Amino acid sequence: AQSVTQLGSHVSVSEGALVLLRCNYSSSVPPYLFWYVQYPNQGLQLLLKYTTGATLVKGINGFEAEFKKSETSFHLTKPSAHMSDAAEYFCAVSTGTYKYIFGTGTRLKVLA
Amino acid sequence: NAGVMQNPRHLVRRRGQEARLRCSPMKGHSHVYWYRQLPEEGLKFMVYLQKENIIDESGMPKERFSAEFPKEGPSILRIQQVVRGDSAAYFCASSPPGFYQETQYFGPGTRLLVL
């Protein structure tokens, strides 16, 4: 069975500081991994995804994530936070099927 | 190019009433998925539909819940005789025709509150 754990339901960073949102997964088969972002009153927007190949994945808005099989992690980072990054972020895993398993989300707050 | 549309965005029902949630997929998409997010939990898969076909409803509660995706019109998630435990956010996603590994695009969700 697959599962996703997002450490920290709320994360606060100062504007310009590093953003690090943690995601650990469990999967018995090679996973497909996703990060989605949800702005208030909007749908989930895909930030980036890992399927196969290069383990460092670059996404939109300056975000990137690294697939680390040995650590079963797929943490999301951005070097410098912007006020517009304030949102809720969801990590998800699938085995390449249509069933995505989501984490419980991390709400990012950016302090001026 | 409009994204996935869901309506209503907020829905309040009293116990025992019916709730109908609508989802219009992105233009050109023929696969629809419904997920439910209970308070303090992640989104959980409910059902996968293609036009006029239910492909996988393994995540749907056995009673009171049904889904359809007719040849014309939006996909509908129907909850009969709602109970307080049905209060949740219901998200719809769609993907293009072809292999279902295509990325899923999500709508803004419908927040259902059962009084």
Image: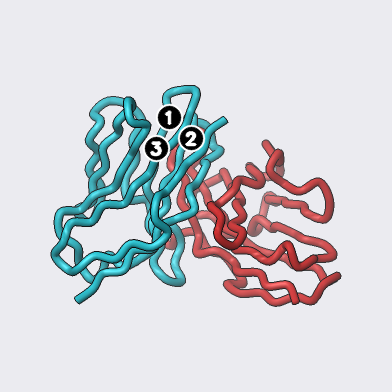
Q: Chain B shown in which color?
A: red
Contact, CB < 8 Å: mark 1 with mark 2? yes
Viewer-proximal residue, B80 or A1?
A1
User: What residue sits right under mark 1 in the picture?
Assistant: A31
Quarter containing the N terminus of chain B: bottom left
Residue B17 in picture, x, y percent from top left: 83, 71
What is the chain identity of the residue bearing mark 1? A
**Chain for numbered disc 3:** A
**Which of pointers 1 and 2 lies earlier in the amino acid sequence?**
1
Q: Which residue is mark 2?
A: A94
The 10 Å Cα crowd at callout 2, few under 14, some 14 to 19, many 20 or more, is: many
Instruction: Respond whether the residues carrying marks 2 and 3 are from the same subunit.
Output: yes
Front residue of this view, candidates A16 and B18 = A16
- Residue A60 lies, in percent from the top left, at 25, 52
The label on residue A33 is 3
Question: Residue, x 46% and y 38% (percent of image)?
Answer: A93
Tell me the crowding category of disc 3: few under 14, some 14 to 19, or many 20 or more residues within 10 angstroms, Cα based: many
Left or right: A112 with respect to A32? left
Pointer 1 and pointer 2 on the same chain: yes
